[in-house]
Image (spheres, grey):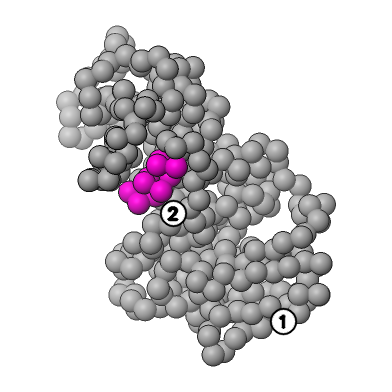
Amino acid sequence: MVNIALELLASCTGCEISILDLHEELIDVLEQADLVYAPILMDVKEIPENIDIAIVSGSVRNEENKERLEEIREKANTVIAYGTCACYGGITCMADLYSPEDVSDRSFKDNPSTESAAEPSEVVPKLLPIVHPAGDMALIDYYLPGCPPKEYLVKDILVPLINGEEPVVPKKSVCADCERTMEHIEFDKIHRRVEGNPDPDLCFLSQGYICMGSATLGRCGALCSSAGVPCHGCGGPSLDILREPNHDVYNCIVNRIAHLSKMPHKDVEKQIYDIGHIIYGFVIGSTIMENKKVSLIPQLIKK
Amino acid sequence: MVEIEIDENACVGCGSCVDDCPNDVYEMDEAKNKTKVVNADDCMACLSCHEICPAEAMEHKNIHVAKRLYIDRRVNDILNKII
């Protein structure tokens, strides 16, 4: 039997739910594995010893997250950074666009929907100056990006890992699965995602909508673009972007829109709006993405 | 010699690599609406096609690592661990 632990740090629990989404196949997994610790599903409070595979989701926002991550790293043979938050910071690292004081003031003092109160000083763990992906704070054995990773991936990855084999899964970008046709069409205006009525068969980029698909690790089956929503980049950067030091999500999207529309790069850059949320939304916490020379993340985050 | 493989399931037929390649390595296969390699001998492994391809449809084999840009050791380590 293989002992599996699920730890969640600063996260939305969607990653744990994606493991439950295995449904009947969960029984096949549990035939070979014991779930020994999972705060979201079970009543075990302390991290047990001798964990074979620890699946860690979420980012490190406060001191408690940091302690728990360090403890589970010590007690587990294999640690998987599970989900985009654990790999690159994901949604949770968008808090880096504000200072910790701004964040706690918004929660306790200046929130229009709650009565203003003093910030709690006991029991509540102290916030770290910035949010870190779990992958930047501990030695990780495998990274599995996705928001959350799709359930069939979980099966294709978890089952071989339990059997001690290397998982083989596709690593292409979202465009590889997208059914829309990418065409070179000249235009000079970038639209906001809420504007207009995009053609359902034509690539969003060809219509002037910012779609992160070509810059994003796919294997989601291009769910959003087939439902009429441009890709938000929840899978994290595509591996080509991650690998090349002078290649970044921002310049990838600018280059591609300029290439398809024949707009000058400067015009594209002028029209791209809300870069922190739209372009870097899911990767803003990642040190790899921040350390790229062309990255705009250092200008965006408040330290 | 550089070998270039096109994953036809991934290729979206946008023709960006045909426009972008400085050495005209690619051409559109009009019947299939996919790109095809017509001139692999001229490839200088600049990998600009990798940068422009939205679907990561191409794979270059036998390229000398020194031809590539400096790649961070930590990045490389993480790349090998992504599953």
User: A235 left or right of A36?
Assistant: right
Compared with residue A302, is residue B22 higher up or lower down, i.e. above or below?
below
- For badge 1, the amino acid type reads Val
Tag in front: 1 or 2: 1
Q: Which residues are magenta?
A: A150-160
Compared with residue B73, is residue A264 higher up or lower down, i.e. above or below?
below
Chain of the residue on which disc 2 is drawn: A
- Callouts 1 and 2 close, C-beta under 8 Å: no
Indicate the quadrant where residue A31 lies: top left
Count how many numbered circles sit on residues in the image.
2
Residue A207 is situated, as x and y percent measured from the top left of the image, at: 43, 75
Indicate the quadrant where residue A83 lies: top left
Query: Residue at coordinates 42% horizontally, 17% vertically from top-left?
Result: A50
Q: Which residue is mark 1?
A: B38
Query: Residue at coordinates 57% horizontally, 63% vertically from top-left?
Result: B56
Residue A277 is situated, as x and y percent measured from the top left of the image, at: 42, 49
Residue B38 is situated, as x and y percent measured from the top left of the image, at: 72, 81
**Which secondary structure class fits the magenta region best?**
helix
Residue B11 is situated, as x and y percent measured from the top left of the image, at: 53, 73
Seen from the viewer's position, the closer of residues A265 and A200 is A200
* Disc 1 and disc 2 on one polypeptide chain: no
Residue A131 circle label: none
Indicate the quadrant where residue B19 lies: bottom right
Residue A7, magenta (yes or no): no
